[in-house]
Image (spheres, rainbow, N blue to C red):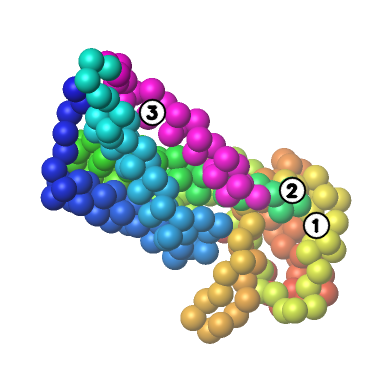
Amino acid sequence: MSPTLGLAELIVRVVVAAVLGGAVGFEREYHDQPAGFRTHILVSLGAALFTLVGTYGMDVFTSGATRVSLDPSRVTAQIVSGIGFLGAGAILRFGLNVRGLTTAASLWVTAAIGAAAGLGYWEGAVAVTVAVLGALYGLKWVERRLLYRIKPGRVRFTIEMSPELRLATLSEVLESHRARVDRMQLQSDEDERRLLVASISLPPHVGPEMLAAEIAEVEGVMSVEHS
């Protein structure tokens, strides 16, 4: 006979799965990522339910002398495989850039958090959620402030742009110097200026000052800063 689970414990596990998944999804929603608050909650809830069904729900299908062999790990393994299609949908390609890898990884780990909550493994579910939030919030600052500076050849350009700027023209300038765009993101500051923030890897013979001067001449570029 499979193990049983009371209604109160069931509700607690479902609610915890939703809360922890939503905590991860809130960060993704805040940064306008393809999969946000509701998606992460649904992924966590789905993983929790699959785990609950695989662990506690099989008793419904047993009767009399019928014996059912339970292996919850098989259900968990299928959750890991099944979450792949959502992760693939979150990965988008913009020209030379690929976005959504972090969101795809957050969906994957959210499924693991939901599975842990479904099993009642509170310590693991909460600890991983805290670690994920620390990585998404805290390490972003480290990446922007530290890694951009210590990685050879990588320069962070902040371009104030107007609606007349054509990204194709900007790409032509970069390609003419064989500069590679590692990351590009649209932002706005407190003065509501439209900013294009790009991390660009420069060849040894190209200086950031020279490239910034050429970018400044592109129509639609109002100012350029680099760090």
Real-space CA distance between mark 2 and mark 1, rounded to the nearest whole angstrom:
9 Å
Q: Magenta span: helix, strand or loop, mainly?
A: helix
Residue position for label 1: 171
Q: Nearer the viewer, mark 1 or mark 3?
A: 3
Mark yes or no: residue 67 visible. yes
Q: Name the element at disc 2.
A: loop
Q: Name the element at disc 1.
A: helix
Mark yes or no: residue 207 visible. no
Residue position for label 3: 75
Rendered image: mark on residue 96: 2
Q: 151 and 20: which one is in front?
A: 20
Check disc 1 and give the amino acid type.
Ser
* Dots 3, 2 in contact, CB < 8 A: no
Q: Residue at x 43, y 60 (%)?
A: 38
Residue 50 appears at what percent x and percent y? 36, 37
Q: Name the element at disc 3.
A: helix
Q: Which residues are magenta?
A: 67-92
